[in-house]
Amino acid sequence: MSQTSRTWREELRSLGYRVTPQRQLVLDAISELEHATPDSICARVRQTASGVNLSTVYRTLDVLERAGLVSHTHLGQGCTAYHLAEEADHLHVVCRGCGTVSDISLEVAAPLVDSLRDTVGFEADAKHLTVHGRCANCRGEDG
Ligand SMILES: [Zn+2]
Ligand SMILES: [Zn+2]
């Protein structure tokens, strides 16, 4: 399963970054994991490269993000999750009851984005948006 586009290598090089095995492994981990946290990325990478530690993963994520290949979102409680940039066109809702994270179309946030721009001139990055609340299942259990 290697749907990571080939062009990421060219993209890194064109920005003056080297293509390294770690960068490849971190990108692969992000494409395989859903809402990949640095911890889960590290665990996945270590299955192949046991010498990799968390600070290497953080440094690699930093480079990949600056190169525009990945983007992150904050899911609350200090949890930062990474997506491939090309798959990051959604916002997140996180359930306080069961902890489920769901991807939501950016169209849902369009009225909010428009209204922020119109009322206070703020250009919102909805891809970075996480909304906390309770999912349909958990609401149902409460009656
Ligand atoms: Zn829930
Ligand atoms: Zn997501």
Image (cartoon, rainbow, N blue to C red):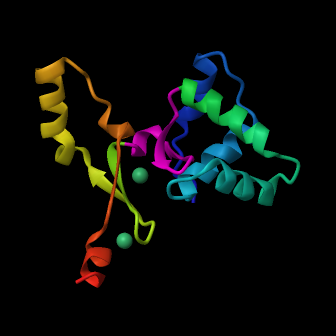
Snapshot quadrant of residue 8: top right
Nearer to me, 92 or 56: 92
The answer to whether 118 is drawn above or below residue 72 in the figure is above
**Residue at point 48% right, 44% down?**
74
Q: Position of residue 96 (x, y in %)?
A: 40, 64
- Can you tell which quarter of the image residue 16 is in? top right
The vertical placement of 73 against 120, above or below, is: below
Whether residue 46 sits left or right of residue 136 in the image: it is right
Residue 71 drawn in magenta: yes
Estimate the x, y position of residue 94 in percent, counting from the top left. 39, 58
Q: Position of residue 11 (x, y in %)?
A: 55, 25
Q: Where the N terminus falls, by quadrant? A: bottom right
Residue 118 seen in render = yes
Q: Name the residue located 40 percent from the left edge and 70 percent from the top edge.
A: 97
Q: Is residue 21 shown to the viewer in this render?
A: no
Q: Residue furthest front?
A: 142
Give the position of the C terminus as an image quadrant.
Answer: bottom left
Is residue 126 in the magenta section? Answer: no
Q: Write the start and end of the magenta stretch as one range.
A: 68-88
Left-right relation of 108 to 73:
left
Q: Position of residue 64 (x, y in %)?
A: 60, 31
Quadrant of the rendered image containing residue 15: top right
- Name the chief secondary structure element in magenta: strand
Which residue lies at the image location 42% right of the left edge and 40% below the top edge?
86
In the image, 3 versus 109, the foreground residue is: 109
In this rendering, the count of numbered labels is: 0
Q: Residue at x 77, y 38 (%)?
A: 55
**Is 39 situated above or below 68?**
below
Query: Left or right: 59 with respect to 51?
Result: left
**For this view, does 28 lie left or right of residue 103?**
right
Q: Nearer the viewer, residue 128 or 45?
A: 128
